[in-house]
Amino acid sequence: MNGADALCDTLLANDVRVCFANPGTSEMHFVAALDRKPEMRCVLGLFEGVVTGAADGYARMTGRPAATLLHTGPGLANGLANLHNARRARVPMINVVGDHASYHLPFDAPLTTDIDGLAAPMSNWVYRISGPADVGPATEAAYRASLVPPGIATLILPADAAWGDAEAVPRNKVVLPALSGVPTDRVRGIADAIRSAPGRVGILVGGTAAQPDALEIAGQIAAARNVRLFGEVGIARMARGAGRVAPTRIPYPIDAAIETLSDIEVLILVGAVEPVAFFAYPGKPSRLVHNDCQVLALAKHGEDLEGALEALRDELGVKRTQSPLRSSAMPDESVPNGQLTDDAIAVMVARKLPENAIVCDEAITSARRLFALSEFAAPHDFLMTTGGAIGNGIPMATGAAIACPDRKVFNLQADGSAMYTLQGLWTQARENLDVVTIIFSNRTYAVLHMEMQKVGVAKIEENARRMLDLDQPSLDWVSIAKGMGVEAARVDTCEQFDDLLDGVLKRRGPFLIEAVI
């Protein structure tokens, strides 16, 4: 047995059974070890941003880490943008980054890099394996670090640690501590704050507090105590749909966000962080709540969020039989017709979303109404880009589909950001994943046009336009998808989109719709 075998065996002993990979020479012994472990599912990504983004989507849907396999510093660097998103989503992940053999590093070979330094900003935990005997304990530590609390663990595997002899010992499952409970005095203090500001209190949920059981409790508190429920600007995962409790998502545009929170005197955080403006704008504040608003943390990431909500409900004297405010059926709205628009797509998708679907939203500006309409759709999960680094949608949908093969995944995708990680379509085709990708083909970085206006630029001239638009030539998404092995079609009217969506819902496997808007 070598070190690479020990690493695989330790991962498998802890139920880490998916490895998203883009390996190189330094990782060949680990690849050979994976080849000896058929119980490990190995998924190839043609770009490291696909690998890390897919591991993010997988973790959001399972709550468990997948492994990634990346080739030295440059391979890790290629995956950093989606590691940033995953870290902001507060999900578990174990990155295995190969490096040169330890004795080769002093020679400064072309791929020699400061992997530890590259990994640190996007990781919650970084460790360099010292030798074959260290592989098993280090992998156990990486697994523990990925889950307590959930976060990004990066393990650097020198080639000689992978090929060196390791002791063949049983690999045991790591025993994780129970979730930390919330102190009683914290719960009482927050209950007092709710009582002191009737009608002006908000609860902001994130993490597992945005899942059905916890939302039910939050909804009971909201109904009984006239409290407003909010979701974060970038939602990692939230249960949505008719019959469920529906928090209001804090808007991305700064003026709308400030208006949404303008009357909140007490904001209670449950698995979330205080909302702030995405960017600085001249004359605008960084905080979205007003300066006199009390921001109180009931439970932080890594604590028992559902238990904390239960404790708060009981402290407030809210009956467990209290009925929360639930979403209702889709409101009456005329069937869209004629020229296709982003709003029409949102209406049609929300109406036809199948029960238990997964929606991955990286449409940026184009699908902004869909989240509001998702309140009335069939019950589903809603995932968004969390860190603002674009190129997350296609990989996130890929990982979600691998995590939940029996659920249909919809990726609402802006055309500009899709170009960052379009290689994920190839992985969807290879793995035959049930993903419907809807490309909002407006042939521009629409969000940047909006940002130019918000920073005070009144008129866009030719140089700026050429940096913000995607025409001349226009992207041909049908050809791109087919080149990756994914069936695709282009539509530009509501009638065409509606008919195509009906057909896609009746089939399995990857499909791309280029929606020209």
Image: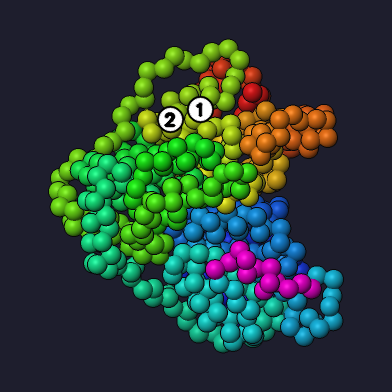
Kindly identify the residue that appears in the image at 42 percent across and 45 percent down. Answer: 231
x, y (%) of residue 279? 60, 47
356 left or right, relative to 200: right
Whether residue 426 is visible to the viewer of this picture, yes or no, is no
Relative to the observer, which residue lies in front, 509 or 68?
68
Kindly identify the residue that appears in the image at 71 percent across and 53 percent down. Answer: 47
Q: Are marks 1 and 2 in contact (CB under 8 Å)?
A: yes
Q: Is residue 92 above or below residue 268?
A: below
Which SS class for mark 2? Answer: helix
Relative to the observer, which residue lies in front, 402 or 109?
109
x, y (%) of residue 178? 33, 70
78 left or right, relative to 3: right
Q: Which residue is mark 1?
A: 346
Q: Quadrant of the C terminus?
A: top right
Q: Which residues are magenta?
A: 112-124
Kindly identify the residue that appears in the image at 54 percent across and 65 percent down. Answer: 152
Q: Which residue is mark 2?
A: 373
471 left or right, relative to 68: right
Residue 123 falls inside the magenta stretch: yes
Which SS class for mark 1? Answer: helix
Kindly identify the residue that appears in the image at 46 percent across and 35 percent down. Answer: 371
Q: Which mark is residue 93?
A: none
x, y (%) of residue 46? 71, 52
**How many residues crowd mark 1 within 10 Å: few (<14), some (14–19), many (20+)?**
many
Figure quadrant of residue 157 = bottom right
Whether residue 335 is visible to the viewer of this picture, yes or no, is yes
Measure how far apart labels 1 and 2 are at the Cα level. 8 Å
